[in-house]
Amino acid sequence: MLTYSRWKYLAILVVLLLSALYALPNVFPQDPSVQISSARGAAVDEALRKRVADVLSKASVPAKSVAIEKEGTLLVRLTNNDSQNKVASLLRDPLGSDYVVALNLASTVPGWLEKIKAKPMQLGLDLQGGVHFLMQVDQKAALDKRLDATAEDVRVSLRDANVRYESVERRANNSIIATVGNAADADKARQIVAKGQPLLVQNVVGNTVEIQVPEAELARMQAEAVEQNVGTLRNRINSLGVAEPIIQRQGTDRIVVQLPGIQDTAQAKRILGATATLEYRGVVEGDAQEALRSGSVPPEARIYFRRETGPDGKPIPILLNKRVIASGDQLIGATAAFDSQSGTPAVQIRLNGVGGQRMFDYTTEHVGKPMAVVYIERIPEVRTVDGKEVRSTRISEEVINVATIQGVFSKEFNTNGLESQQEASDLALLLRAGSLAAPMDFIEERIVGPSLGAENVARGLKAVSFSFAFALIFFLIYYRMFGVITCLALLINLLMVVALMSLFGATMTLPGLAGIALTVGMSVDANVLINERIREELRAGLPPQAAIASGYEHASGTIIDANVTAFLAGLAMAVFGTGPLRGFGITLMLGIATSAYTAVSVSRGIATLIYGGRRKLKTIAI
């Protein structure tokens, strides 16, 4: 008898409904949009919405909507991709540096689907397109940073060797001049520097040591800065959860970043380009206001400004030591938190051995004295001059906290003085991902279309549709009713693959499509194997219902064995492969699992539903 358990029918029904539900978000297209978010503390409210709407109205730019769709984000939904760059350019000048204006693709998936975590399948850059950033590394800043670090290393080396020096200063020609007490000390200083910095050229002139960085070493420093920035960008992009990103060096000082299907370009832009970091410096005693007025600053000090303002509405000046106690470069851990005493946003800091030792040494010698935390941020600015975009960069250095050292500490402590929990979270993320070796500026930003081109994608979809239609016609003619069953199983198979890809957040790329095409072929093969086995049983003289049952039972073992070996190959590609190879392996595994299920279980359920209840069945359409 041809029978099928009710619970198996129920399982098929549940799988079919869930597959349809989780594949449904792929039907809803994305709206090209411009996203506006707060740069730091600026309000995103109804006043901003009206301000943006007025700018668009005056420029006669149509928009689907201008609305605050989630807290802290204003979204301008547009009718086409061509309007995005125009609207972004229109809004950047009026909004200034208080807001981040970024291109985006906004989801149109209904809220009830989002509540059950149903979301569209992620597509790779070769299918969907995404955000393209071209970033330029500031090579001068990279050299300045490395040379400053080298000068500090020279000071530490001389101090550790008990060689007294008057000054260690950088010169404009990428050299460092160390001035000591006499010629004998100069020769000793040269030997110490040569031992610690063998790649540098040292010349002794009187009581000074000139330390010159060779051109080859300068070029190596610049190349290392770009490579370190590429690595840091990878860490930051991983924290954003972007699938299949492309990060490539272009030329000597540029980096291309492509983020397929990115949903929050404002966050991406803020995290990628940010160079926010912290420095811990000692406070120098003295009247900072008088030093600011007269220009007479102690030689070991530099004037900074506190974040808060005084009674006159201007930032409060403060004198800090030029020597950095510890910085973000020496950090190995950072977590956003709230201060246990004040309840304000804070970042819990953990330093490495070098930074922890320097902090321990400083706090041991300066208990009861103030120490300051400097928040350093490089802010890109875009202005329109004579109809052209002019890009510049403003470096913001603010003292966010000054506190008295109550006791000795080293590796672990809290940093307070941040304005919001969002600022604390962003700073902690940046510090964890690693600091950039050199600042970078966005020199190009755009939404890129599929690399295949819209026309080629349309032709590809048409080709798939025609091939599926031809297969349907062939099965209907050759297998008749069982051809219909095969095609239904094939459709359910595709539906399940799309649903699983969407549910698990897997990325569909061109190699992934190839994997699906392969699994569809394997599904067809499995159904052909079953159909031919049923024909053999009929020719052997079995009744139709018994032939159907025997065909599925005898073919199922062969199908599962063949699929297991292919599944293991896909697993190896997914585990050991990267990029396109990994995408191919993932889609292959999902497709194999769904193909085996639809061929062995779903098609049998449909066949039983059609033929199982007929008592006097003499022939079947196969």
Image (cartoon, rainbow, N blue to C red):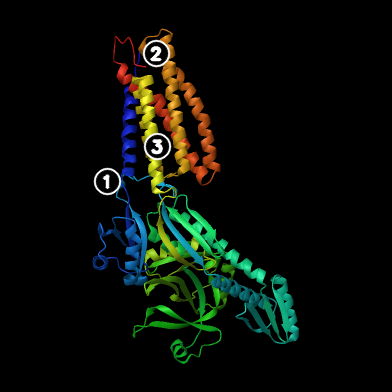
SS at mark 1 in the image: helix
- Closer to us: 416 or 515: 515
Q: Quadrant of the C terminus?
A: top left
Amino acid carrying mark 3 in the image: Ala
Q: Mark 3 or mark 2, which has the lower sequence index?
A: 3
Residue 70 appears anywhere in the view: no
Q: Residue at position x 31%, y 11% from top?
A: 617
**Residue at x 67%, y 76% (from the top left corner):** 212
Mark on residue 463?
3
| Residue drawn at x 38%, y 12% as measured from the top left | 546
* 3D distance between C-alphas at marks 3 and 1: 34 Å
Against 124, is 498 above or below? above
| Residue located farthest toward the bottom when viewing the structure as drawn | 294
Q: Quadrant of the N terminus?
A: top left
Please name the amino acid that badge 2 sits on. Ala
For residue 352, what is the image quadrant?
A: bottom right
**Horizontal placement of 415 versus 33: left or right?**
right
**Disc on res. 547:** 2
Q: Position of residue 9 (x, y in %)?
A: 32, 25
- Label 3: which secondary element: helix
Residue 580: where, in percent of width, then height? 50, 45
Q: Are marks 3 and 2 in contact (CB under 8 Å)?
A: no
The residue tagged 1 is 112
| Marker disc for residue 122 | none
Whether tag 2 and tag 1 are in contact, CB under 8 A, the answer is: no
